[in-house]
Image (cartoon, rainbow, N blue to C red):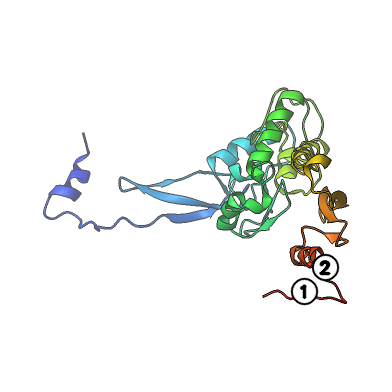
Amino acid sequence: MLPRHILRRYVEPGGVRLSSVEPSDEVAGSCVICLRPVHRKRVLSVTQLDGMYKDGGFYHYGCAIEARQSKGLGKVQPAWGNLDPEDYRFWIGVRDPHLNYAMCRCCGESTYSAKERAQHFKSDKFRVNGMNCGARLALAYNLMLSTQGDCIICHKQRFMFQKWGVPICQDASCHNAWRFDHNKYVRLHGHLMAQKKKEEFLKAQTKLPPKAEDLPKDIQMVSQVGPDGATVFRPFCRVCLMMADRPEHEKEHAKRLLGGGEDNPVQFN
């Protein structure tokens, strides 16, 4: 049963007039760990702190738990930086919570907003074997979790512990390194390179030269190294002494078959 002074505010004519609009949340202060604001929220006309206050500082509940665990282990405190916790699975952030910069862990592409990060995963430009960067990283993490028993950062035994789906121990210094450092992790890089090698192999299979008996007698296949370093095969015309896949070859070849040349040009309408 509600106290009488509460009932009077709502039902008695002489009670206090209440505003029809609930006041917006107030910022109590910045979290000591992640530096993001800790709010005071209105719940049933009662103001509650969406976090905790301890030793002269404000904490989010999750930050306080992680800080307490790291303090008990005698380690450094974690820092959350500028990204949401789940974003660190695929992105490298910065410590300053006011910056929007993030770098893709897979391809190294830099972005400056959440919208750009979402568009990055939708772009076909960065796909390998039909997979975007997120899918490629997820596949690499799953393989590493099943084959790697140590921490990707400090290489100590992690005892099956993982964070963000990544084989990483519970040391807060390793979490900070994963969030913000631009280190090259050899085994992760190896899995990503293996995915690219597989794509190159599949592309090479589709670029194999046709059999000699399937080609016209004046055409032979020659190999060249493409701009991306992959070997490609192109048709070479022995009559025109030029690549048969060039746009002007068809017209040049017809002129030569009709007896045309520099001394006897053939006119085309």
Q: Position of residue 133 (x, y in %)?
A: 66, 45
Q: Earlier in the sequence, mark 2 or mark 1?
A: 2
Which amino acid type is shown beneath numbered disc 1? Val
Is any atom of residue 107 visible in this view?
A: yes
Residue 72 located left or right of residue 61: right
Which amino acid type is shown beneath numbered disc 2? Gly
Query: In the rendered image, which residue does mark 1 sit on?
Result: 266
How busy is the neighbourhood of tag 2: few (under 14 within 10 Å), some, or many (20 plus)? few
Label 2 sits on a secondary structure element that is loop
Residue 96 located left or right of residue 9: right
Query: In the rendered image, which residue does mark 2 sit on?
Result: 259
Q: CA distance from mark 2 to mark 1?
A: 8 Å
Residue 104 located left or right of residue 258: left
What's the residue at 65%, 36% (across, down)?
138
171 or 167: nearer the viewer: 167
From the viewer's perspective, is residue 21 above or below residue 162? Answer: below
Label 1 sits on a secondary structure element that is loop
